[in-house]
């Protein structure tokens, strides 16, 4: 079989197709949110949240083993704990970030690492699974849930991304103003706090959603990298948005294809692609600046 | 009723008082210049009136139904990130955002307004350039244009002349003056250019060394503080 035939063979499985679509959707949403997050110097929120989501996932899976057996639900029911915890943490992290008197970054590093430690401990002590390190790896780096993606997961992903895209389009101009110069935006009557909060909540929901596919550790890479790559070369906000969207979607698409063909872990393959794109665009940016 | 009235306000950071017990008011149509030496708290005062900082004591009342979305603001220093890619056009247009109401997108009038203002400020030819690649003076013009786009009743300008060349500066003063006299927009300007301040303004607020001075331009010219500040250089 040549490469193309192998690919077609894999794509004949519905879960592989679902994984490809959901992966691209995740990339699309995270790149849109990423630009705002990176430019507001709020990317620590994405990072902190992903660790917290891991901790919450570990605790919830420990607490919910009996519930899981009763309901038979996998992904959906663990969200009962993970989603609210992550949303609340998003609000708290945002408050910390805005309050410059507290050393925000150090505190967030502390919280992140604690959430990781607690999560790993809980998984080790309470897990009934025989393959603990497999579970941990899956939660941190994705991969386990890909083969379990169902049609309803796909539908949920489609709806969720549609909501994110609509919110983003409607708030696009306001996000620009609030991101570019927060003091001006506040002074001229924009409710910056509300938009910050909304973005933090959406990013929290995104992380929880994407954790299953990409893994909680790697999702923040998907948020940060495309925006950083696009910022190397773009000259306007609009072009940053469009470029980072294109970069992110392409990296996700080819990353997932590549991971199927080489049977590498999906999350890390996509992140490697994003990293490569970042390198490429940095070089391009440097080249353009020198030529100009 | 006054547009803005400040009663016995004290300003500062982390409990360190910068301005103590200041009272003044701004009426609709006034052209107020705030003068004083570096570090006297002028920018802090402006930020406090804009509710970007909290006063330590006293109260600031906005009257006549003044809302924040009728205000334009030119900050002295912006916390704009150096690597933020935004085009001049996007930035000036974002000034008109407070006229959008609930509409998520810019309407045609807003785009026309932004275009006309860019023309007046002399940045129409750099509309598609990236802000971060402009010179300091060009950046100042862009932020001035944004402030003008946002102002429908009141404009706050923190050292608008900073970085402008003499021709652009003269144009800027004329522009603000016309805005004040013809469109009836209230101006509150921080300036170190005392000559321009007494030339254009209707009221002067002098802070720094106590006693502070607040009154009309004519009163200022007669006062001891005013004489000292205006003619101090020759002594
Ligand atoms: N963010 C801040 N935190 C703490 N202190 C500050 C802060 N900003 C300003 N200050 C202090 O407050 C005082 C007044 O500063 P402000 O910027 O209001 O002065 P200014 O009158 O605008 O001066 P300039 O003419 O240089 O613009 C200064 O002593 C300054 O050190
Ligand atoms: Mg100042």
Image: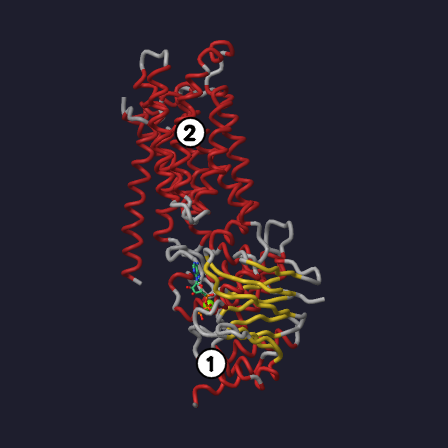
- In the rendered image, the vertical position of residue B174 relative to residue B155, given as above or below: below
In this rendering, do the residues under marks 2 and 1 share a single chain? no
Near-viewer residue (B18 or A165):
B18
Badge 1: chain ID? B
**Residue at the spot 37% in from the left edge and 14% down from the top edge:** A127
Q: From where the camera sits, is residue A246 visible?
A: yes
Per the model, the C-alpha gap separating discs 2 and 1 is: 57 Å
Q: Secondary structure at mark 1?
A: helix
Q: CB under 8 Å between callouts 2 and 1?
A: no
Q: In the image, is B215 to the left or to the right of B36?
A: right
Residue B218: quarter of image: bottom right
Disc ID at residue A192: none
Residue A56 at x, y percent in the picture: 43, 25
- In the rendered image, the vertical position of residue A282 relative to residue A71, given as above or below: below
**Residue at the spot 61% in from the left edge and 69% down from the top edge:** B24
Q: Secondary structure at mark 2?
A: helix
Residue A35 at x, y percent in the picture: 43, 46
Residue that badge 2 annotates: A53
Residue A250 at x, y percent in the picture: 38, 38
Near-viewer residue (B234 or A29):
B234
Q: How many marks?
A: 2
């Amino acid at each position: 079989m040549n490469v193309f035939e192998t690919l077609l063979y894999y794509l004949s499985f519905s879960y592989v197709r679902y994984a490809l679509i959901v992966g691209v959707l995740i990339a699309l949403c995270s790149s849109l949110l990423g630009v705002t997050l990176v430019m507001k110097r709020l990317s620590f929120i994405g990072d902190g949240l992903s660790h917290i989501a891991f901790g919450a996932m570990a605790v919830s899976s420990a607490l919910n083993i009996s519930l899981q057996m009763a309901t038979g639900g996998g992904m959906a029911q663990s969200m009962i704990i993970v989603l609210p915890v992550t949303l609340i943490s998003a609000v708290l992290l945002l408050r910390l970030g805005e309050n410059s008197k507290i050393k925000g970054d150090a505190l967030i590093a502390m919280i992140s690492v604690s959430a990781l430690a607690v999560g790993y401990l809980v998984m080790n002590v309470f897990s009934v699974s025989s393959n603990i390190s497999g579970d941990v790896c899956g939660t941190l780096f994705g991969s386990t849930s890909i083969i379990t993606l169902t049609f309803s997961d796909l539908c949920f992903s489609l709806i969720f991304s549609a909501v994110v895209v609509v919110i983003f389009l409607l708030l696009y101009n306001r996000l620009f103003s609030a991101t570019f110069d927060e003091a001006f935006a506040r002074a001229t009557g924009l409710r910056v706090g509300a938009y910050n909060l909304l973005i933090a909540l959406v990013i929290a929901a995104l992380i929880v959603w994407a954790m299953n596919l990409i893994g909680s550790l790697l999702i923040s890479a998907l948020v940060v990298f495309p925006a950083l790559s696009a910022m190397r070369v773009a000259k306007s906000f609009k072009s940053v948005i469009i470029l980072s969207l294109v970069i992110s979607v392409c990296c996700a698409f080819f990353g997932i294809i590549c991971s199927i063909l080489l049977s590498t872990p999906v999350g890390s393959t996509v992140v490697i692609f994003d990293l490569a794109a970042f390198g490429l665009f940095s070089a391009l940016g440097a080249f353009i600046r020198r030529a100009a | 009723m006054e547009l803005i009235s400040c009663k016995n306000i004290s300003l500062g950071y982390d409990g360190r008082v910068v301005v103590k017990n200041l009272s003044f008011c701004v009426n609709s149509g006034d052209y107020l210049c705030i003068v004083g030496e570096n570090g006297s708290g002028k920018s802090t005062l402006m930020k406090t009136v804009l509710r970007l900082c909290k006063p330590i004591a006293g109260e600031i009342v906005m009257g006549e139904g003044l809302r924040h979305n009728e205000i334009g603001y030119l900050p002295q220093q912006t916390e704009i990130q150096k690597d933020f890619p935004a085009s001049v056009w996007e930035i000036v247009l974002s000034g008109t955002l407070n006229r959008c109401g609930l509409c998520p997108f810019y309407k045609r009038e807003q785009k026309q307004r932004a275009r006309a203002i860019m023309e007046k400020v002399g940045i129409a030819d750099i509309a598609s350039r990236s802000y971060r690649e402009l010179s300091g003076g060009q950046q100042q013009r862009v932020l001035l244009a944004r402030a003008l786009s946002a102002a429908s009743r009141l404009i706050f300008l923190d050292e608008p002349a900073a970085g402008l060349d003499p021709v652009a500066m003269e144009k800027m003063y004329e522009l603000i003056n016309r805005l004040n006299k013809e469109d009836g927009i209230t101006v509150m300007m921080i300036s170190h250019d005392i000559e321009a301040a007494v030339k254009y303004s209707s009221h002067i607020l002098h802070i720094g060394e106590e006693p502070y001075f607040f009154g009309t331009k004519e009163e200022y010219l007669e006062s001891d503080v005013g004489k000292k500040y205006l003619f101090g250089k020759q002594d």
